[in-house]
Amino acid sequence: MNEIYNITTQRNKVEELHLEIQGWKSNLDFINDEITFIDHLLNSYAFQPNTQNLFERLQDYLKRIHKSKETKKQLQKLIVKHENALGGMIECTDASCDLTYYQKHDKLKASVLDYINNFRDLKAEIFNYAGGIMKKRKPNAEMK
């Protein structure tokens, strides 16, 4: 009976961690869509051309977005590796094995959350800047 309890307990722990990992993957997938949108925005002709330092600012944002993409790719690789190792946790029968996995999980979780927060800050900075220098279209008086 004790053996069944241990396997059930381990499976519950693994399922809980797996759900958290799926959340990370979902957030990073959504960020991928946001990066695509931002990349298109920064490469569009939607900005006032006479804005001081426009080119330099857009190039800086493009560079930072590129760096964010690279960081995200590295995180996604680490997540896949971590998720693959999760299966081995079911066979764990001692606390030290659990502790090692949880420590790795917590470290990766901190990295993912740090990345998400940094990306949100960058996105807000870009949107605030872009919103202030977008070309203003005059409404078409005649609707055809």
Image (cartoon, helix red, strand yellow):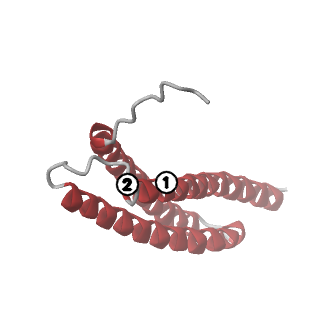
Q: Amino acid at mark 1?
A: Phe
Element under label 2?
loop
Which picture quadrant has residue 26? bottom right
Residue 41 sits above or below residue 98 on the image: above
Q: Nearer the viewer, mark 2 or mark 1?
A: 2
The percent position of residue 72, horizontal first and vertical second, equals 46, 65
Q: Residue drawn 39% across and 35% down? A: 137
Q: Which residue is mark 1?
A: 37
Give the position of the N terminus as an image quadrant.
bottom right
Q: Residue drawn 26% across and 64% down? A: 59
Of 41 and 24, the residue lying toward us: 41
Residue 76 sits above or below residue 41 on the image: below
The percent position of residue 96, horizontal first and vertical second, equals 53, 67
Residue 88 sits above or below residue 42 on the image: below
10 Å crowding of disc 1: few (<14), some (14-19), many (20+): few
Residue 6 appears left or right of 123 = right
